[in-house]
Amino acid sequence: MNAEELRAAQAPIKEKYKSDPSSAIQTMSVTGTVQPNQSCRLETAAGPVDAGLHPAAGGSGDQACSGDMLLEALVACAGVTFSAVSTAMEIPIEHASITAEGDLDFRGTLGVARDVPIGFTDIRLKFDVKSDAPQEKIDKLIQLTERYCVIYQTLKQPMEISTNVSLNAN
């Protein structure tokens, strides 16, 4: 898809959202079923995914790790956003890859040290880009990718998360 085709595809959607802002609000949902072996089965568009404990928390490593899945979601979102923005900016990309690394001290989640934070304490996103475009255009591309990447912005400026419990649910 080139820049003109992308703009044409997005134009009616953008117009709809401008004229009816509430139509832009979409509720996304994922359901997981807790399994007896310290895992959770997620039904995804790509098929079921079994998530389990990371080996550093006692898992076998045979199942997806939610920490890895968080980083994968960040890379996927940044990659899709990068691709769309580079297309819109008409920046030719010969090759691009994105790597996310995150530091997590497992003493926190295992309750070994109460003073250790639970969760990632640092996440680094690295773009490896091969393009003939000038550096300032690539810099702008990365800036806009960060700005419009949903997962990046969610992690950078977290929102409130609420919990609801239903007993005897099916």
Image (tube, helix red, strand yellow):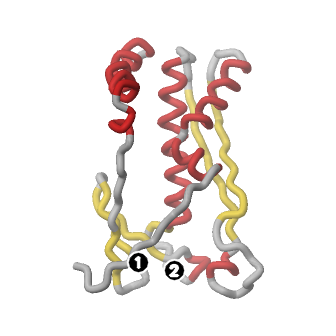
- Dot 2 or dot 1, earlier in sequence: 1
Name above or below for residue 86 compared with residue 38: above
- Marker count (numbered): 2
**Vertical comparison of 42 with 14: above or below:** below
Dot 1: what SS? strand
**Residue located at (32% from left, 79% from top):** 166
Residue 105 horizontal/vertical position (percent): 70, 73
Q: Which sits in the foreground, 59 or 3?
A: 3
Report how far apart the C-alphas of labels 2 and 1 lie in the structure: 9 Å
Residue at the spot of label 1: 39
Percent coordinates x, y for residue 151 in the rendering: 53, 48
Q: Amino acid at mark 2?
A: Gly
Residue 85 to residue 158: above or below: above
Where does the C terminus fall, quadrant-wise? bottom left
Name the residue that disc number 2 marks: 59
| Residue depth check, mark 2 versus mark 1: number of the one nearer the observer | 1
Q: Which mark is residue 69?
A: none
Residue appearing at x 49%, y 79% in the figure? 60
In the image, what residue occupies the spot 54% across and 46% down?
75
Amino acid type shown at disc 1: Ser
- Name, please, the residue furthest toward the left: 170
Question: Residue 133, located in which quarter of the rendered image?
Answer: top right
In percent of the image, x 37 and y 69: which residue is there?
50
Query: In x, y percent, where is residue 84?
Result: 48, 27
- At label 1, counting other C-alpha atoms closer than 10 Å, the crowd grade (few under 14, some 14-19, many 20 or more) is some
Residue 16's quadrant in the figure? Answer: top left
Report the residue that reaches farthest toward the top.
4
- Residue 5, relative to residue 33: is it above or below? above
Label 2: element kind: loop
User: Which one is in front, 85 or 62?
Assistant: 85
Where's the N terminus, which quadrant?
top left
